[in-house]
Amino acid sequence: MPEARGTGVGPALLARSLASAREAGYDACLLHYLTASRAAPFWRGLGFRPVSHRLRRFVDERATWGRG
């Protein structure tokens, strides 16, 4: 919810989740997020960094109608 942004709820939930994972013996966390999304600064601010990139291209099918 927009009114909850910036109140610390997200980082607190993440910290507790990571602590639980650590207690269970995990030493790493993998997160999938779109680097172009509005949420990307939130994840980067919490220490997450992109480790892979995906390029995607859409071809306008109107440009391919004349193929043989």
Image (cartoon, helix red, strand yellow):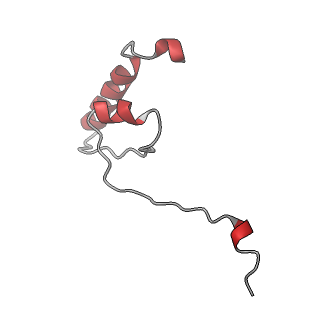
Q: In which image quadrant can residue 20 be found?
A: top left
* Percent x, y of residue 26: 27, 43
- Of 14 and 5, which appears nearest the observer? 5
User: Which residue appears at 44% of the width and 58% of the height?
Assistant: 54
Furthest residue in direction bottom, as rendered: 68
Image check: 62 left or right of 3? right
Position of residue 6 relative to residue 61, above or below, is above
User: Which residue appears at 34% of the width and 20% of the height?
Assistant: 12
Position of residue 10 relative to residue 39, above or below, is above
* Percent x, y of residue 60: 67, 64
The N terminus lies in quadrant: top right
User: Which residue appears at 30% of the width and 26% of the height?
Assistant: 15
Q: In the rendered picture of this protein, how many numbered marks are placed on residues?
A: 0
* Percent x, y of residue 4: 47, 14
- Of 39 and 13, which appears nearest the observer? 39
* Percent x, y of residue 56: 51, 60
Position of residue 36 relative to residue 12, above or below, is below
User: Which residue appears at 39% of the width and 56% of the height?
Assistant: 53
Q: In which image quadrant can residue 66 be found?
A: bottom right
- Of 63 and 56, which appears nearest the observer? 63
Q: In which image quadrant can residue 67 be found?
A: bottom right
The C terminus lies in quadrant: bottom right
